[in-house]
Amino acid sequence: MKKVMPLLFIISSIYLYFHMSQVIVNLQDCPYCYGKDFCNKLENEINYKQLSIIERLYNSINAKNVFYAYIGDQKVVLKKLAHNYELNDLNNFICKKNNLSYNCKLNIIKDTHDYYKEIVELITTEDIDVVKNFKVCSKYGADLFLSTLADFNQNLKENERLISIWTTLQINVEPLILHILNKKKIKWPVPKYYGACGKLIIESYNGLMLTELADLDWSQRTYLALQILESALIFTEGDENFRYYLTDVSPDNIAVDSALKITFIDLENVIMVPKLPNKSLTVHRSDHWDEDSDFSFSEKQLCENSVSDHNIYAVCKLILSANAPYPMMAGGLLHHPPTDQSSKHNSILANIELCANPNQNVDRFLISRKIISDLEALHKSIQLD
Ligand SMILES: Nc1ncnc2c1ncn2[C@@H]1O[C@H](COP(=O)(O)OP(=O)(O)O)[C@@H](O)[C@H]1O
Ligand SMILES: [Mg+2]
């Protein structure tokens, strides 16, 4: 074993060196890329010296097209946002759209399409084969979304800027959402977006996945539960223009850093519902109507109502509940509570089950606030001990 590890290290470092140069080469696809604002910094400041062997190996295996690196002293993840075959498919789709042959060169295309219109069509279409991961509900939502992105990739000419937004939307909306949410005065529980270079984005590294942390102390896990529930409310209520409903809530999409701060790291699947002026308040209550899956939601109902308890239901059912399904740890995030449970512990656990149970006619906004205030009190009392 002693001899194998250094050998693996050398092989993976060599592989990584060549592999990373390839990642950046996708710049030739621009303007059909995510942007170019981070290219200089990436070229001059990227380094892998501080990565662990495991991270170097992960980079070499590169199953998810996610790479770990450092920009100066800041640990980051580099994401291509899709598998290589999906990126190739998009390139060929662009060739075809411009009446060019398979594998055409993208950077010489004289593209005359109206990309504002194309984007609106893309994110409002009813055709689920076109875009299934991201929706804004209506033309009003699409216009509002694009006006919120007026400062995205500002270094590009307007048509190239719109092409970069269109390309990003074809692949994965994450950088656009991060760009919007990073501008908020109060910090949202999402990664910091540094920018893009070709078909690569750079965002903060936010720690290990929740799935890897089943062994934390119960009190530490209650602190995570508190933040996760608070985040569900922030995504629902924290923006003046939109409500963000996360449609892929999963413990392997929640990261936890060394200070136990949580971050929602995979923002590919989101329904952004615009807040309509003068619309009377209609509250949607999530329930379970698809027997074949652990969790179900209706895009139509999320779009039609002014507010939904979708995010609260999702985190209660998929993360917090004792019956949370795989890949959540057995017994849910608050598994194995202390044996000397106080009435506060019992009330938290009981309220989580009420929130997660689709058949209970409870107000999840009220119940989540009650759980949050009980978890806060618990957290404070633990800190005082
Ligand atoms: N900001 C981040 N911080 C730490 N790890 C991350 C981050 N983004 C992605 N990862 C790691 O990469 C994996 C895949 O990234 P993700 O964005 O979830 O893409 P996928 O669509 O392939 O699930 C995650 O499960 C996580 O292990
Ligand atoms: Mg993921």
Image (cartoon, rainbow, N blue to C red):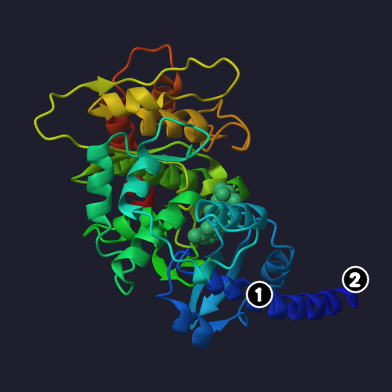
Residue 340 visible in the current orientation:
no
Kind of residue at disc 2 = Met
- Discs 2, 1 touching: Cβ within 8 Å: no
Q: Disc 2 marks which residue?
A: 1
Rendering coords of residue 271 (x, y %):
37, 38
Choose between 116 and 368: the one closer to the eye.
116
Image point (51%, 43%), residue name: 218
Kind of residue at disc 1 = Gln
Q: Which mark is in front, 2 or 1?
A: 1
Image point (58%, 68%), residue name: 105
* Disc 1 element: helix
Ligand 1 sits in quadrant: bottom right
Residue 218 visible in the current orientation:
yes
Choose between 318 and 366: the one closer to the eye.
318
The answer to whether 19 is drawn above or below residue 370 in the figure is: below
Choose between 246 and 342: the one closer to the eye.
246
The answer to whether 83 is drawn above or below residue 203 in the figure is: above
Q: Residue furthest left?
A: 278
Choose between 110 and 246: the one closer to the eye.
110
* Disc 2 element: loop
Q: Which mark is residue 22?
A: 1
The answer to whether 184 is drawn above or below residue 322 in the figure is: below
Q: Residue furthest front?
A: 99
The answer to whether 175 is drawn above or below residue 267 in the figure is: below
Is residue 54 toward the left or the right of residue 116 in the image? Answer: right
Q: Quadrant of residue 176?
A: bottom left
Q: Are there few (<14), some (14-19), or many (20+) residues within 10 Å of tag 1?
A: few
Rendering coords of residue 295 (x, y %):
51, 25
Is residue 20 toward the left or the right of residue 362 in the image? Answer: right
Rendering coords of residue 234 (x, y %):
29, 44
